[in-house]
Image (spheres, helix red, strand yellow):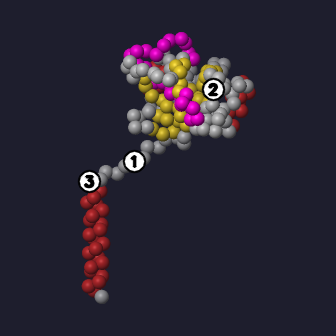
Amino acid sequence: MKKKNSSSYLLLIFLIFIVIFSSLFFPTCKKEELNPGTEKDTTGSIILTAFINDDKYEDSVIIKPIAKFEKFNNVTIVNLWDSTKVSSYGEQLSLRIKFGNVKEEFLIHDSSYFATPMWSSDSLPVRILNKNNKEFSEWNKTIPELNSDAIVLGTEAGIDILLYWNGYKFNLFWPDEEP
């Protein structure tokens, strides 16, 4: 009986040694916690998912910089803040919205708005407003054409603005300046 216990004991010590030794060569991984419906792609861009055009297909909202001299093929370029074009020198951030059921893609940009300090922080002031969220009905009272998920964007003034699809184009709603 003693021999069986000693061999089990040696086997246990050997396994513990293997686990400890292997941990020296295989670093542990820490999973980055993101909000539900949010993920990062391989380029580090942030991807949000929603039903922006209110069909039954999930749409992607990708937050990423515009590269220097980037070309846009089959992309509708939208600037709802002013009429400036995409800078050939790139821009700090933009929103790329891809509808899930069609090959439509939109580039929402503004070199001034997305260059403010809040867009350089670790926690970007952007989130999805889901149609079934209680907050949705509050926004819908002032925006009757709001029929689907939308994108809430923060401002330097602390006022949230709403980027939404009205069925034909993107619109930007600025509420009164009361934080």
Amino acid type, mark 2: Trp
Q: Position of residue 63 (x, y in %)?
A: 48, 29
Is there any visible trace of residue 64 in the rendered image?
yes
Please tell me whether residue 43 is drawn above or below residue 2 in the rendered image. Answer: above
Q: Quick check: is 81 in the magenta stretch?
A: yes
State the extent of the magenta-drawn residues as a range.
80-104
Q: Which mark is residue 152?
A: none
Toward the bottom, the furthest residue is 1
Report the residue marked by disc 2. Answer: 165
Residue 127 shows in this picture: no
SS label for mark 3? helix
Q: Dot 2, crowdedness within 10 Å: few (<14), some or many (≥20)?
A: many
Which marked residue is nearer to the observer: mark 3 or mark 2? 2
Q: Position of residue 144 (x, y in %)?
A: 73, 25
Are there few (<14), some (14-19), or many (20+) residues within 10 Å of tag 1?
few
Task: Give residue 2's position: percent from left, percent from top.
Answer: 28, 86
The residues bearing labels 3 and 1 have C-alpha atoms spaced at a distance of 16 Å
Label 3 to label 2: alpha-carbon separation: 50 Å
Q: Amino acid at mark 1?
A: Lys
Depth check, front residue: 106 or 32? 106
Q: Report which quarter residue 6 is drawn in.
A: bottom left
Q: Earlier in the sequence, mark 3 or mark 2?
A: 3
Q: Residues within 10 Å of mark 3 (few under 14, many from 20)?
A: few
Q: How many marks?
A: 3
Q: Residue at x 34, y 51 (%)?
A: 28
Q: What mark, if any, has residue 25 been given in the picture?
A: 3
- The residue labelled by disc 1 is 30
Above or below for 107 versus 129: above
